[in-house]
Image (cartoon, rainbow, N blue to C red):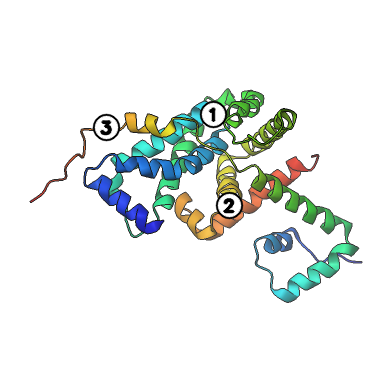
Amino acid sequence: MECFVSVNDIRRYFDGEMKQEERDQFYLHLPDCIKCQEHFEEVKKTIALTQSASHIEAPPAFTSKVMDNLPHKKPRRRWKT
Amino acid sequence: MDEWMKRCVQKVQEGDTDAFSEIVNAFKDRVYQISYRMLGNSQEAQDIAQEAFLRAYTNLSSYDPNRKFSTWLFRITTNLSIDKLRKRKPNYSLDAEVEGTEGLDGYSQLAAQDVLPDEQVVMLEWQASIQKEISALPPKYRAAIILKYMEDLSLQEMSEILNLPVATVKTHVHRGREALRKRLKKW
């Protein structure tokens, strides 16, 4: 079967820019095209791995370190007229 | 959250320094995550995250309260991180190996109490490997990937943070994703 899907089409799929019918066609095409299947699965995996790595916390005592370094005298009171 | 944040900002602007600690507490993890992911090294990330809050504090008068505070704060953080990357010595990339493994320090702060030690080690290694791949991306693609997939931000917010048109942000996400895809193929 001839492949009509471009890299940009796959990008549009993942960026949610495909219309419903385009998406349907794309799904129908996937089982027939190893190249697209591979690309599709790889992008999915890339997104999943990146999302799953996203839980870091700031080091302990971070807030107190920031607060200790603030220029305390600076704004204090704004000028009142 | 937004109303509460507005009140905090107002209090700080009126001279109540302590109110700023509430702002730091609310955003420290996300600011640290952005700087850590950008720089791939916990010491630099900590310096930049602290600097970001310091800048936010001293420039609070230039913050427009009608806009989202987090957008403004993340913009400061991203700019500082990119500046830091630019100032690195050109041969820094030779230390990429170190850059990746150093992440292990950062991850020792992960909340992972329920995980068994062995599994924890595997997870740390795995996390460090992902960070290594992210660190290999050019900074502008790296920023796009971090904001989109790790901070889960909209293209519109990303465009304000990165000061780029939405179409450019989209291109950067796409290129970053494609570069990562090729690197993660072997995984």
Name the residue tied to disc 1. Answer: B42
Name the residue tied to disc 3. Answer: A71
Query: In the figure, B140 relative to A68: above or below?
Result: below
Q: Is residue B165 left or right of residue A28?
A: left
Q: Which amino acid does label 1 sit on?
A: Ser
The residue under the point 35% across, 36% down is B54
Mark 1 to mark 3 CA distance (whole Å): 25 Å
The residue under the point 70% across, 31% down is B120
How many other residues sit within 10 Å of disc 2, few (<14), some (14-19) or many (≥20)? many
Quadrant, the C terminus of chain B: top right
* Residue that sits furthest to the right in the current view: A1
Q: Numbered disc 3: what chain?
A: A
Q: What residue type is labelled 3?
A: Pro
Q: Is mark 3 on a helix, strand or loop?
A: loop
Q: Is residue A56 visible?
A: yes
Q: Residue A65 carries which label?
A: none
Q: Is mark 1 on a helix, strand or loop?
A: helix
Q: Nearer the viewer, residue B121 or B76?
A: B121
Name the residue tied to disc 2. Answer: B148
Q: Compare marks 1 and 2 and give the one earlier in the sequence.
A: 1
Q: Horizontal and vertical percent for residue B81? A: 48, 37
